[in-house]
Amino acid sequence: MELSYQVSGMNCDHCVQAVTKTITALPGVEAVRVELPAGTVAVVSVGEVPIEDLRAAVDDAGFELIGRTS
């Protein structure tokens, strides 16, 4: 399953690495793709990762998860 989310505050490669690392550590996450110019993060997982877990991971990295993109 792949779902995309809008994340604010990312503006450099370090941001991409930080967000990727924290989300990848969540149970069930298989891959993370960050589109820096769009400010989106695609999460590939074996099932839907609870948005509360994603929000906490993104917050821990120093950014804000705005919500799911359509």
Image (cartoon, rainbow, N blue to C red):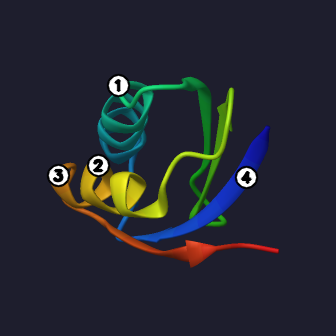
Question: In the drawing, does residue 66 fall left or right of residue 17?
Answer: right
At label 2, the amino acid type is Ala
| Real-space CA distance between mark 3 and mark 4, rounded to the nearest whole angstrom | 20 Å
Residue 56 vertical position relative to residue 61 in the rendered view, above or below: below
At label 4, the amino acid type is Leu
Q: What element carries label 2?
A: helix
Q: Where is residue 5 in the image (x, y as percent from the top left)?
A: 61, 63
Labels 1 & 2 near each other (Cβ < 8 A): yes
Classed neighbour count for the residue bearing mark 3: other residues with Cα under 10 Å, few (<14), some (14–19), many (≥20): some
Residue 39 vertical position relative to residue 32 in the rendered view, above or below: below
Q: Is mark 1 on a helix, strand or loop?
A: loop
Q: Pointer 1: what residue?
A: 25
Seen at 35% across and 52% down, the residue is 53
| Real-space CA distance between mark 1 and mark 3, rounded to the nearest whole angstrom | 12 Å
Which of disc 1 and disc 4 is earlier in sequence?
4
Labels 2 & 3 near each other (Cβ < 8 A): yes
At label 1, the amino acid type is Ala
Which of disc 3 and disc 1 is earlier in sequence?
1
Question: In the drawing, does residue 13 fall left or right of residue 68?
Answer: left
| Real-space CA distance between mark 4 and mark 2, rounded to the nearest whole angstrom | 16 Å
Labels 4 & 1 near each other (Cβ < 8 A): no
At label 3, the amino acid type is Asp
Which of disc 2 and disc 1 is earlier in sequence?
1
Q: Pointer 2: what residue?
A: 57
Classed neighbour count for the residue bearing mark 4: other residues with Cα under 10 Å, few (<14), some (14–19), many (≥20): some
Quarter location, residue 13: top left
Classed neighbour count for the residue bearing mark 1: other residues with Cα under 10 Å, few (<14), some (14–19), many (≥20): few
Seen at 29% across and 38% down, the residue is 18
| Real-space CA distance between mark 2 and mark 3, rounded to the nearest whole angstrom | 5 Å
Task: Residue 3: give its label.
Answer: 4
Q: Pointer 3: what residue?
A: 60
